[in-house]
Image: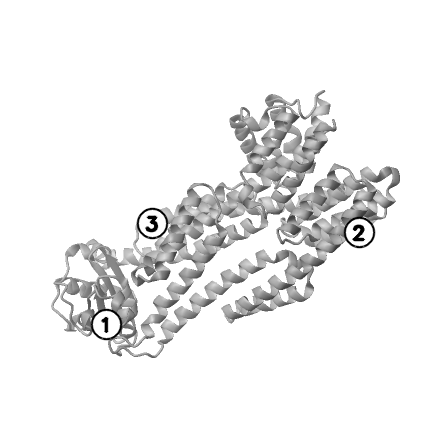
Amino acid sequence: MSLTRLPVKMLGDMVSPRALERIFQDAAIARGTTVEALDVPTLEDILKKEVFKRLQLSVPAPLAKKRVSEVLAELMKSTQERMFAGPDAASIATLEESARRFALYFDWPEAQRLRGILGVVRDEEKAGRDVRPLTQEGFSLIGLMERRLEEGLVAQAQDLAELRATFTRVEGLGNRDVRRLETLITQIDEAQGQGTLLPAEVERARDLTFKLRKLLESSVVQPLGGLSPDLDPEVQARVQALEQEHTGKVFSGLEREFAPLLRAREDLEAQRQAFARQQQAGKLSSEALDAWRADLTARRAEVVEGQRQEYLRLEEQLNALQGGADVRVLLDSARMALDSGAMISDELDELRRTVGVLQAGQGAAEELLSLNRDLMALERDARGVPGASEELAPLLADALAAVGRGERIDPAPLWEILERHMGAAAQQRENFDVRAEHVIREYDAVRGLAGETTQRLGRLADTLRAQRRLGAMSAEARERYVQTIVDAEALLAEAQAEHRAAQEVTSTFGQDALSGLLDVFDLGGGDGSGGGLFGALDDAPAGPQADALADDSLESWVVEGGQVVDGSDDPTARRVVDLLAAAQALGLTRVDLGGPQGEWAAHSDGQGGWRVARAATRDPLDRVARPWLETGEV
């Protein structure tokens, strides 16, 4: 197989693969050889000359040089790999072996078309026909699926990190949903280690984490231990924020899942836009999305059935017209997509035009079919490049209509438009990488600071490192990359502010105060007998909440003028009270501390005093003490 597969794959986000293939073909002919016979030194010369020159038409020279250098480095490492060796028969065997890696992802459009190719290529080989175009397309599809898998694993790793972080927070609830979440996390972790995607399990785990986080936040409104059953505004705001975060993720998932249907139905696209406005306004409900999902599922089933009937009619026409191997591949892949319940709008468009070309093309049918395939591929590629579809849509419609009438057109100007947008997208990607690198570098400067902000930033920094290592990105992966950068930059600003505050503590109260603030639990604790306002939780009324907290004790203190006026005489509590003076000097109104010997929470009363509570775990602080900490009422 040709060595050019690697540079086509690595540079396909800057110049169209077809243009690169033409460059290599022309350059090989100019050197008196063929693409299949190119050796490494000759390919290196082509990359440094013809390819580098072409890249400069769409991106700055430094970026073009950087990307060519990356290809050359990878080429040196890969020249001995099996993927580059062997004649056509060996290539077919390699293609079949590569396809087995993606057997689990049979519903991917790329996998369905690959199966169609594999179903045809052996017959074509036995008939003595040239199968190189089919095997080349097959390996291109393998490349697309490899990219999709790599992107999926990066996203799954990010989901897994967030699921683990949430599990740590809700583990104390100890109910059946917590155990189910733990089982799902274990399954996803094992799949991640094996390079396998489990989207259904991730979705179920997300739903469980939302349910458990909402329970953890809202459970403080339950009448336990005499606390007020009224919903505190701050708690209500946190619950609403959780709900909107969850509905936003569900909505995004529905947009991706039903994208072909939404593109095909203007009325459903109008509904999507209305839901998007509700989501932005914070008014989108889970119930509305559940109803929309059911409606979309039913509508898609209706569309698929209608498309099945049209497919059967087109299949009959094409069989009568005796289309070649490419037509058989298209028919087979479309049928497999229908069998999996997927829509085949693009495939039907291509089938309709194929019928028209075969009926009107007469002696030029093969040339027109090639043009039709080229334009359809251009249309699909443009969807993944920002701004390209909008500019190309009317031009493509005219070109496809002309081919359908049996007219010859030159697609080169359309590819040039796409490549211009691809170059802009590549430059934008370079800028994104610079921003990501800045976040990663600055995180290293604040990573030693304890706190939830830094922990969340650390998880996003890990994701950014993985995203930067990805090669050419799909539109969906690029959107995730941008969102990760935006979220990480916001958290970095918070972490840097906290870091400056910590430095102010050091400069104002000395290093000992900062060390005490971060490591207060190394100083020891009280007798653990419980006391203050709440006493031991064993005295709380029986019930589900009491069962979950039976092994914890909860203590409270009231601080006025820097002195404890209500609560036990505990040495660690006295040290915390001293640290609250530093917190108040920094303008802080809430302090949460955690360590091996317990969890603490303190809220300012707005008049120079503090309400303080301590428990063995965070759970009773959130369930029982939080309303009193926030309002002073029980």
Q: CA distance from mark 2 to mark 3?
A: 56 Å
On screen, residue 151 versus residue 120, left or right, reads left
Give residue 565's quadrant in the image.
bottom left
Residue placed under numbered mark 1 in the picture: 611
Sequence order check, earlier mark of 2 and 3: 2
Q: Could you tell me which residue is drawn at 67 percent across and 25 percent down?
A: 36
Give residue 217's quadrant in the image.
bottom left
Disc sitting over residue 447 in the figure: 3
> Which structural element holds mark 2?
helix
User: Alpha-carbon neighbours of circle 1 within 10 Å: few (<14), some, or many (≥20)?
Assistant: many
For badge 3, the amino acid type reads Arg
509, 596: nearer the viewer: 596
Q: Measured from the top left, where is residue 447 in percent x and y?
A: 33, 49
- Do the residues under discs 3 and 1 have CB atoms within 8 angstroms? no
Q: Measured from the top left, where is residue 237 in percent x and y?
A: 40, 71
Residue placed under numbered mark 2 in the picture: 398
On screen, residue 577 versus residue 142, left or right, reads left
Residue depth check, mark 2 versus mark 1: number of the one nearer the observer: 2
Position of 329 relative to 217 (above/below): above
Residue depth check, mark 2 versus mark 3: number of the one nearer the observer: 2
